[in-house]
Image: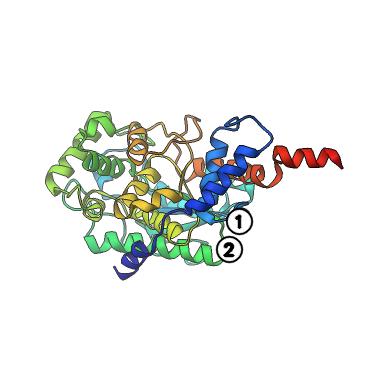
Amino acid sequence: MQLLQDTIENIQGADMKGMEQARKRIDALCKSPGSLGKLESLAVQLSGITGQLYPTVDKKVMIVCAADHGVCEEGVTTNPQDVTVFQTLNFPKGGTGVCAIAGITNAKVVTVDVGVKADIPLDAGVIIHKIKYGTDNMAQGPAMSKQEAIQSIEVGIRVATEEIIQGADVLGTGEMGIGNTTPSAAILAVLTGCDPIEVTGFGAGVGQGGIAYKAAIIEKAITLNKPNPKDAIDVLAKVGGLEIGAMTGIILGAAVHRKPVVIDGFISTIAALIAYKLEPKVIDYIIPSHASEEPGAKIAAALLGIEPMLHMNMRLGEGSGAALAFPILDAACSMMKNMVTLEEAMQLLKR
C-alpha cells in the first residue's frame, strides 16, 4: 500500500513550458499550420512529458501482464482458460501477435505472471509476480480482496520502474487473460452507471449465451458485490482482474518517472481509467494507440478525453495496438529533430 501511495503522491503534471516551446517550434516549421495533424499534438505531448524540445523514444518496452479470471466458470467465453498459460509461455518465444509487431521497432516484450491459473516454469522467460491463481468468480463474490487489488497495482509499478531504470524511454501496456473483457466491461459499467449491455462486446469469443448472457453475468456480479464507483480500488477488487491492476500500476509507474505510456485497446483503456481515478495527472502521460472493436472502448476513451490514433478494426489485445503505434512516436520525434523551420530553411539556401 505504501508504494502505491508514494507513487500517487509523487506524480506531477506535464511540463507546460516545454509544451509551449514545442508548439512554437512546430508552428514555425516549414509547413502550413496544423498540416501534420495529430503528429504535431503528439510531439507537443512528448515534449511535455520529457521536458525536452527534442524528445527521444529509442528504447521501447511492451509489458504484457497475464492473469486468469474465475468468472470463466459462468461460460462467458468459448475459449478454454488454458490458452492463458499457453500464450504466456509463447510471449518469451516471440510467437505472438504483439511480438511480431513489436519487432518492427525492436521493442522489448516483457511478460509478467500476475495471476495465471497454472505454475509458470522459472526458466520460461516470464517475470513471476503471481498474487493468486486467477481471480475468484465475481458472479459468486468479490474477484479478489482489496489488498490483492493493491498488490496487483504495485506489481505494475515495480515492473515499470525496473524497465525505466534499465533505460526504457517509453512503455506499452498489454495483457493476456481469457475472459478479461468481462471484468473490463463490469468496471466500466460501475464507473459510468451504464447498463452492462451497453458496454459488453464479443471479446475473443463470447459464450453460447451470447452478449446478453455475458451482460447478465456482469449485472449479477455488480448487484452481488456492490462496488463503490467512487473508490476505484474497490471496483477493481470486486469486479476486476489482476492483469488490469498490473497495467494500472504500469501507467502510474510511467507517470511518476515522467515517461510516456502507450495503451492498447479496451482492457488497457480500463486500466488507464482506474489509474486516472487514482490520480488524474496520469492523463498527461497516456498515449492512446488504436480504437478497439469492443463497444466499451469508445465510452472509456471518451471518459478519459483521449482519441485513439489508429482505426484498424483490431481486438486481439496483448498490446498489439500499442506496439503498432510505436513507429508513430518515432515519426513525431523525427519531425521535431529533423524538420527545419522556415527561417532555418532560408539560412540553408543562403549557404
Circle 1 sits on which residue? Answer: 59
Whether residue 220 sits left or right of residue 109 in the image: it is left
Q: Earlier in the sequence, mark 2 or mark 1?
A: 1
How far separated are the C-alphas under marks 2 and 1? 7 Å
Q: Are marks 2 and 1 in contact (CB under 8 Å)?
A: yes
* Amino acid of disc 1: Lys
Circle 2 sits on which residue? Answer: 167
Judged from the image, the secondary structure of the residue bearing numbered disc 1 is loop
How many numbered circles are shown?
A: 2
- Which quarter of the figure is the C terminus placed in? top right
Packing grade of label 1 (10 A; few <14, some 14-19, many >=20) is: some
Residue 157, given in percent of the width and then of the height, sits at 41, 62
For the point 30% across and 55% down, the residue is 278
Q: Residue 61's image quarter?
A: bottom right
> From where the camera sits, is residue 34 visible?
yes
The label shown at residue 223 is: none
Residue 53, given in percent of the width and then of the height, sits at 60, 52
Whether residue 350 sits left or right of residue 3 in the image: it is right
Q: Residue 268's image quarter?
A: top left
Judged from the image, the secondary structure of the residue bearing numbered disc 2 is loop
* Amino acid of disc 2: Gly
- Which quarter of the figure is the N terminus placed in? bottom left
Q: Nearer the viewer, residue 267 or 10?
A: 10
Residue 339, given in percent of the width and then of the height, sits at 70, 41
Colour scheme shown: rainbow
